[in-house]
Image: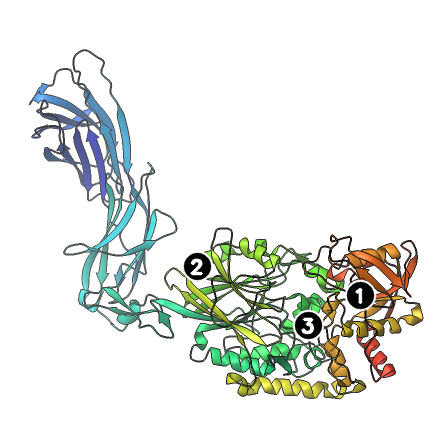
Amino acid sequence: MKTKKRSLCTGLVHVGLASVALLSTACGGNGGASEGHVGSGSLAITAGASAEVAGFQIEVSRGGAVVSSTFVANNASGTGGPAASTLITLAPGNYVVKSTALSAPGQPLPGCSVASGKISVVVGKTAEITLNDRCEVGVGAIDVNAGANFVPELTTVTVQPSTTVSPCERITLDLAATDRDGDPLTVDVAIQPGAPVAVPTTPGADAHSVQASIVLAPQAVGDHTLEVRACDALGCGKLDIPLHVKAGDTSACTAACDDANPCTTDSVTPEGVCQSTQVADGKLCTGGKLHVKLLGLNDFHGQLDTGRVVSGRPVGGAAVLASYLKAAQAGIEDQTIIVHAGDQVGASPPSSALLQDEPSIAFLNVLANGACTSADKMNPACNIVGTLGNHEFDEGSVELLRLLNGGNYVKGPYLEDPYPGARFPYISANVIDSASGATLLRPFVVKRVHGVAVGFIGAVLKDTPTIVTPSGVAGLDFQDEADAINAQIPALHALGVHAIVVNIHQGGFQSSYSGPTRPASMLTSGPEITDIVSRLDDDIDVVVSGHTHAFTNALLSNKNGKQVLVTQAFSASTAYDDIDLLVDPVTGDVTSKVASIVTTFGDAGPGLTPDPAVAQIVAAADARVAPLVNQVFGTTAVTFTRTASAAGESNLGDLIADSQLAAMAGLGAQFAFMNPGGIRADLSPGNLTFGALFTVQPFGNTLVKLDMTGAQITHVLEQQWLGQSSPKILQIAGFDYTWDPSKPVGSRIVEIRLGGVPIDLTKSYAVTCNNFLATGGDGFTGFTAGLNQVGGPVDLDAITEYVEQNTPILPPVANRIRQP
């Protein structure tokens, strides 16, 4: 229904020592001023002056003709406030107003000038000018000053849904005003009849706009008036809006007062006023703040099966972890979000890796709620969000996207046909498709917990290309983590999000402890994550981290002193982050944050009853790979471990390097190098099965023979410390060397010996390593200088063949890496 807008037009004049107000009523028309307007205006005059002034002659003229001449007496005993007032009825238009100070009616005060000024009475607006009558005292000049002040005008007034509503139907007003003088403004709303009742307002898009809403109860059937005013210190622009409440259905009365705050109970009074009562403290809210729980995971690495031990007790496995996560959110499932910080897949045991890590995605799909679907991953009610780690790129972006989005692998199907992909979103803000310039994945996702928004931004360490084979990151750019994260903040703010969590695949190290966050507990190392956090936007509250397979539960400060909660829960399903937030439902800000890192013991609590649905996935995966995994290639009575000596050598590293040197001996290899990060598990005494050997070396890298000079080999060994965030001691075979930790980085290699004889820096030698190292992986760019590359077998084939030919496997010759 089209409604007629009514407005009130006012003008205000300060004349000399008199205050003159012009008021036009019943302006009519469409809001513009013209000679054709109907109705009348009024000139309200208030005067005040010193005792010498008997009063003022106020003359109002239009088009040269005097339309009003009025004497206003001064009743004040001295300089001060108003002393008299009168009212002159006028038509809207343009006028000249003169003020003459009088010693008596009709007698101009000697030595005083006549002040004059122009004023326009405009529909819907209020104008104000100041005139000063200057009076001569003794001998001197007459100085006449004139100034103008414009009273504010309402520029936007919208009423939704209509000015005729049903009982309890919510009416929403959007109001905006302007002041051409730039004076501070207030905008307010009141409802009549009777004494005006103020209507609460909330800030709008800028300082001069507000929003208001009102609900009228069934008893309010009839006609009302909304009075809207925009005011500065000297006056107001006003608009009256007729409002009609018709008799009708009252079922909307309770719903109309719902303020969307989950921590209040809302109702409407018989007088039509909405009232809210804070809910009692409990699982939903505390002190009017909403509980939100985050359950954080990192570096799962396909650890479907049990077998891990912490403090002599069994820990982890997907089904045990799932049981813990379900127990942690029991009763508050709709307030809980599961967050993982990358490396969910890759470097995985055979039960996951041999099936392209599809079971590790299926495990999380079991934990996903009904709002998570392959077709609607960004649904704000979906309870899981993940991000990318460096290992998600092991087989390149094409395979990564297949794993996330679904579709059978070329050697599939495996457990599901067709494979559906992840039912939940993966996000990453700093991985860019080089061709398009767009992010490879959506940079963020917004979740809603009982209507309250919580934003999540994903990121992976920018140095991913240095720890992944070039083919894995081909066509991708990796941006600075903090810059990419902060770039998403404006978009989240535009969506009204102020509670923000970062899940990032980068981390640090900290001494572990039990229980809630200790404010004074800091990282022992981890300059990368510390630098990233220091540069994050103030609206970021929590960082769920990963990559270093360590413990973190600390409050780190950004550059402005804002404390950010940073967590990390070891790796491989052995623990999880239990994070509790309190979020203000009105402002959307996090008001409290605390975490505990919980170990997933299999012999107590939830670990005693592994989740049956996840256990079924694990059993199916184990059965599918069993024929290959259980194949025995040899035996050993030795425990082969990744634990290194003080010099950096491990017996498992020696075994792997020996196997690779033997595999490439036919091509003349003399030196062998193995990157320690590629050794993913230890070997226990007993049968050496394909599954055990695969778990040690799951990447499927191929061996390469290349020619390098003695100087180039020396440079590669110096790179174990040069430019590394922490030392990466290569495991070796075929030679030995001595290094001195007291010497500066870049000059630590003392001597390299081949067959007990120091190598010649100018001579060329045959070197073998895997293709990851050969392309400069882990920062060992020195290998890229090698010449005459020749490919060899897969590293896993090399060790299985070595074990088969040399069983039982004995302890390798040690002391290859020495210190003085």
Q: What's the distance in space between the residues labelled 1 and 3, CA to CA?
A: 30 Å
> Which quadrant does the C terminus fall into?
bottom right
Q: Nearer the viewer, mark 1 or mark 3?
A: 1
- Above or below, comparing residue 819 to residue 125 in the picture: below
Q: Amino acid at mark 1?
A: Ile
Residue position marked by numbered label 3 in the rendering: 346
Dots 1, 3 in contact, CB < 8 A = no
Snapshot quadrant of residue 676 = bottom right
**Residue 299 located left or right of residue 207:** right
Q: What's the distance in space between the residues labelled 2 and 1, CA to CA?
A: 58 Å
| Element assignment for label 2 | loop
Whether residue 785 can be seen here: no
| Element assignment for label 3 | loop
Residue position marked by numbered label 2 in the rendering: 496
Please state the horizontal and vertical placement of residue 694, each as a whole percent of the image. Answer: 75, 78
Q: Nearer the viewer, residue 97 or 733?
A: 733
Whether residue 283 can be seen here: yes
